[in-house]
Amino acid sequence: MALKLRPTGLGAGIDKDRQGYTVYSGGWDVGRIYEVRGGPEHLRWFWEKRSMRLGRLAGVLVAVLSVILAGSAAICGEWTRWQDADVAAGIEQDGADLVVMCDTRAGRALHPESRGLILMFFREPRANWQKGAQLDVMTITDDGGRWDGPPSHGAAIEPTRVMIQNGATWELWVMGKAKTSFTISAGDYTRTFRAENLRKAVEPVLHECGDHW
């Protein structure tokens, strides 16, 4: 079925000159394509798809949890790759964890070298999200830096875990700008993680997806 683009019409404040389009398929709103400023030129345009179906979420969850559980002992308090797994990196800190992985089955980003999509998984033990709940996600560096686009979208795949697909690349880009730490918020919950060694640990994940810092 053909896709149709309609101007988003952001039209206010800092967004008034930003180009953006809502994407429709058969009358259904299936995502947005919009211009992002302040980032790398090859990521100027961002394609935001609507959330995955729960069946797809469950499949991704099974795959990533096997990696998380296998490597959890090695990531307490610092960013590192998992043993024997170049496609995932993460940190566990104060009972929470943040995992970045490349999924080559979920599709590709817009830039021509892309080989997959960056996914991010955030576990907050204090949360009690309903499975499938949609959450706004935002990252802020220790010096106040953040992505100037709208919040990223996350979907709860467990009561304490949210998956960020749409916008994960941009949240990661902000994290990579942090000097010593960054804060990530999902819905009403906020957590601060160390940034030390993040860029080195995540580099193989980006490479797997055909991307780079």
Image (cartoon, rainbow, N blue to C red):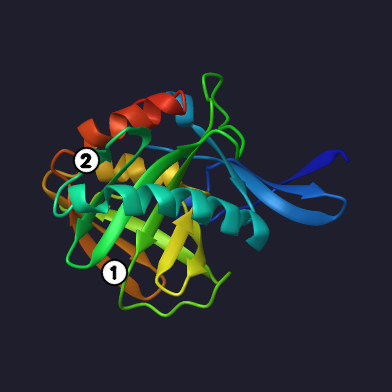
SS state under label 1: strand
Amino acid type, callout 2: Thr
SS state under label 2: strand
Disc on res. 190: 1
Measure the alpha-carbon separation of dots 1 and 2. 22 Å
On the question of residue 148 being in view, the answer is: no
Rendered view: 76 above or below 202: below
Whole-percent x and y of residue 144? 21, 54
Whether residue 113 sits left or right of residue 179 in the image: it is right
- Label 2: few (<14), some (14–19) or many (≥20) C-alpha neighbours in 10 Å: many
Q: Quadrant of the N terminus?
A: top right
On the question of residue 3 being in view, the answer is: yes
Labels 1 and 2: the sequence-earlier one:
2
Whole-percent x and y of residue 205? 37, 32
- Are the residues flagged by discs 1 and 2 in contact, CB closer than 8 Å? no
Residue marked by disc 2: 80
Residue placed most toward the observer, 166 or 201: 201
Q: Quadrant of the C terminus?
A: top left
Residue for point 46% across, 28% down? 209
When asked about the image quadrant of residue 121, the answer is bottom left
Amino acid type, callout 1: Thr
Whether residue 132 sits left or right of residue 207 in the image: it is right
- Label 1: few (<14), some (14–19) or many (≥20) C-alpha neighbours in 10 Å: few
Residue for point 53% across, 32% down? 116
